[in-house]
Image (cartoon, grey):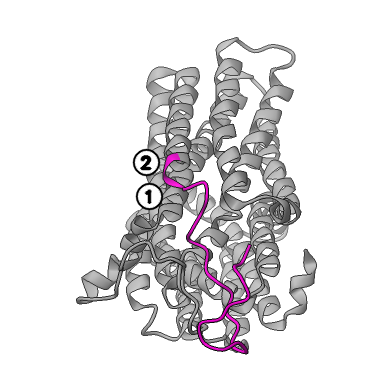
Amino acid sequence: MLSVLRNGTYRRLFTAQVIALVGTGLATVALSLLAYELAGGSASAVLGTALAIKMVAYVTIAPVVGALADRVPRRALMTAMDLTRAGAAAALPFVTEIWQIHVLIFLLQAASAAFTPTFQATVPEILPAERDYTRALSMTRLAYDLESLFSPVLAAALLSLVSYDWLFAGTTVGFLASAALIVATALPTPMPGRAPAPAPAPVERTGGFRARAVFGTRLLWATPPLRALLALDLAVAAAGAVVFVNTVSLVRGYLDRPAGAVSLALGAYGAGSMLTALLLPRLLQRSTDRAVMLRAGFALPVVLAAGAALTATGPRTWSWPALLAVWAAIGAGCSAVLTPGGRVVRRSTADADLPAAFAARFSLSHGCWLLTYPLAGWLAAGAGLPLTVLVLGAVALSAATAAAVIWPARDPYRPEHVHPELPPGKTAGRSR
C-alpha cells in the first residue's frame, strides 16, 4: 500500500493532509477545554452547537465550492483554505464570548468544506492507475482513523507540559505546514477526453452561479451508481450515529464501566475500520465495488440488530466484549462502504466534473449525518437505547435496499481507458 508514496506529488499532498488532521484533532480537545472555561456546566451545549455548525457548514459550503471549482486553480484554493483555517485556529485562544467561538468554528469548518472535496478530486488525477488510487483511498481512511485514535493521546501528552491554548498554536502550525506543502506541489491539470460511458443523462453546466452550485447534485442524481452511493452513505450515517452519539451512554450508564472504557469502545470501532481499509485494496482486485459495498451496507443493519439485542437483554458478563465486537463490526462495515466510494465517483464522472461531484457528495453525505446525529440522541433520551438502535438499523436496512435497487448489477457507467497513442475511435478496452 505504501508504494503510492513513491509518487512525489501524492506524497506531499498526503503529508499535508495528515498534518492538517493532527492539527484538527488537537483543536477538538482544546475547544472542549475552552468551552468549559467560558461556559462551565453549559459546555456540552456549546460543543453541541459547534458540531451542528460544522455540519451546516459542510452541507452548505461544499456546493458553492463545486460551482467555483472550474474557475479557481486548485492549488490556490487549497492553500487559501489552509491559511483561513490557520487564522481561525490562531484566533480561538483570544475569544471571550461564546458567539465568537461559533463564528470562528463556522469559518474553520467552511474552509474545510472547501478544502476536502478539492483534495479528493485532485488525487485521482495524480494517481490515474486504479490500483494506486485504491491504495490512496485506503491510506486516507487509515489517516482519519489513526487521527481519531492518537490525537487525543498526543493532546494529553502536550497538556502535561503546556496549557490548552498551546494546542491551538499546534493546530495553526499544522495548517500552515499543510499550506506550505501544497504551494510546493505542482498539481496536474484535468485529463481531457475521459468521460463516463455511457453518460446516463445530459447534465451540463448551464445557467448562472446558482445552476452551477447545484450541478454536482444534479450529476449525482442523474447517475444510478452515485445515487446508490448516497443511499449507502445514509446507511453509514445511521450506524455511525449509534457509535458516536450513544457509546458514552452504553458504556457508562448501561454497562457501568469506567470513563476510560469509552475510549476503548471507540477504539474498537476504529480498529475495525482500519483493518478493513488495509484489506480492501486486495479484496477489490477480486470483487467489484458494487459487491463489496452492498454486502457491507446490508451487514450494517444486521450488526445493529445484534446491538439492539445486546442492549435489551440487560448487562451480562459477556456484554462488554460483545459490545466491542459489535462496534468493531460497525467500523468494518462503514469503512467497506466509505473507502471505495471515491472509485465509484471517479468511474461515473468526467474528469472536468470531479470537483463538483466530490463537493456534492461531501455535502449530501454530511446531510445524512445531520439527520442521524440528532435522531440517535433524541430517541435514546426519549425511547431508550434498544429502540434507538432498532430504528437506526431500520434506516440502514432501507438505505441499503434502495442502493441495491438503484445500482444496476451490470454497471454500464464505467469510463473507457484513455489511449492517446491509438487512432481516434479505437480503445483497448474498459477499466475494471
Answer left or right for 186 relative to 382.
right
Asked whether disc 1 touches disc 2, contact meaning CB atoms under 8 Å apart, the reply is yes
- Residue 101 visible from this viewpoint: no
Q: CA distance from mark 1 to mark 2?
A: 6 Å
Q: Identify the magenta region.
A: 405-432
Q: Residue at x 47, y 63 (%)?
A: 348
Q: Quadrant of residue 394?
A: top left
Q: Position of residue 125 (x, y in %)?
A: 57, 77
Using residue 247 as the reference point, say whether residue 146 is left or right of it: right
Q: Which residue is mark 2?
A: 371
Which of the 4 image quarters holds residue 103?
bottom left
Residue with the mark numbered 1: 367
Type of amino acid under label 2: Leu
In the displayed structure, 372 sits above or below 354; it is above
Residue 403, how many percent across, how many down? 45, 42
* In the image, residue 134 lies in the stretch drawn in magenta: no
Q: Dot 1 surroundings within 10 Å: few (below 14), some, or many (20 or more)? A: some
Q: Nearer the viewer, residue 290 or 186?
A: 290
Q: Secondary structure at mark 2?
A: helix
Would residue 152 be found to the left or right of residue 424 on screen?
right
